[in-house]
Image (spheres, grey):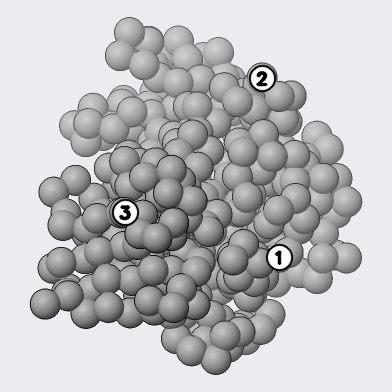
Amino acid sequence: MLFHVGMDSSVLVLMTDHSSREGSRKVLSRAAERLTGNPPVSIDARHFFPGGSGKVTAVDGGLQLEVPAENLVVRPSALVIYEIPPEKRRGFEAAQRQLHAFGAASLGTDVEAWRVATEKDLSVERFTRDGIAQMETISVTADANPAAVFERLGRDVWARPVVGMGGNDVFHVTTDEQLHAATRYYGESGLGWLMARDANNFTPDGVRQQFRVVVLDGRVVYACEHVQAQPDAPCNETRGAVSTRLSLDELPPELHQLAVSATKSLGLNLGGVDLALVNGGVVFEVNVHPAFNTSIPIEESFATPYIEAHLALR
């Protein structure tokens, strides 16, 4: 027997990949309960991956989600989709298309925007088309000569996978030996990859500096500064960078506008933009699901306006 929840169409559903350990699900759940007075119905997105038992249907003109494996049926008034790992997003696209077709009140059903932001070679192409400032970046395709790309970019580059997360599988390459190691690594891992010219985004103190700016519906809602003492490591907290939250007034105005423009270029409602204050500002990437800083109070997190934006869709 299926257990029916929220059949009065007043329930908020939070759909995430429950195998992920990033932690966004907990933050979003707390924000939703704080705003609505009730915890959201939590659904594991893996039920809607290929081979899963999840079903998306329309009943009485409204969206209905069925998860037979959990004996669950729910008619959400709003659906928050988050924490889908980048490498699994292609497999979630069929569900996104169904959700969009059945009118889900959600900011997470735009297949094209997710794909262009997730696959960094596509992001580079889109930024080039729209004139978004970025460091020169070249995809290392199967017929490309990595050594020639390395030379063209000045022999000081960052190698990164086309699809990745948290600064993993990213290398600073300045020597032929490092280039050979990176080429071998991506080849053995089966990962597509790119090389980007180093931005030399150092502060006067000699540490790398990068900004994370979260944009929601065309406005900046959160900003922080990342500094990395290790010059050959990316500016990610998972790789040792130190993060400091900034007030929106502390964010340089040129980065404010650049972050908004980059998010709009990719077609995202929400984007976590990584950028640096060099040459007037350059974008490194835009994250579909920017991770939450769990060290700050929930009411100061961008989780609250993100949930509010979904509630406004009902």
Task: State the residue position of label 1.
Answer: 222
Percent position (x, y) of residue 244? Answer: 68, 71
> What's the residue at 31%, 54% (across, down)?
57
> What's the residue at 13%, 68% (across, down)?
69
Q: In which quarter of the image is residue 179?
A: top left
Secondary structure state at the residue bearing disc 3: strand
Percent position (x, y) of residue 191? Answer: 29, 32
Q: Which residue is outermost to the front? A: 60
Marks 2/3: CA–CA distance: 37 Å
Task: State the residue position of label 2.
Answer: 129
Q: Which class describes the residues within 10 Å of circle 3: few (<14), some (14-19), or many (20+)?
A: some
Question: Mark 1 or mark 3: which comes first in sequence?
Answer: 3
- On the question of residue 198 being in view, the answer is yes
Task: State the residue position of label 3.
Answer: 57
Marks 1/3: CA–CA distance: 36 Å
Percent position (x, y) of residue 288? Answer: 51, 50
Q: Which of 118 and 69 is in front in this view?
A: 69
Identify residue type, mark 3.
Thr
Percent position (x, y) of residue 245? Answer: 70, 71
Q: Nearer the viewer, residue 178 or 185?
A: 185
Front label number (2 vs 3): 3
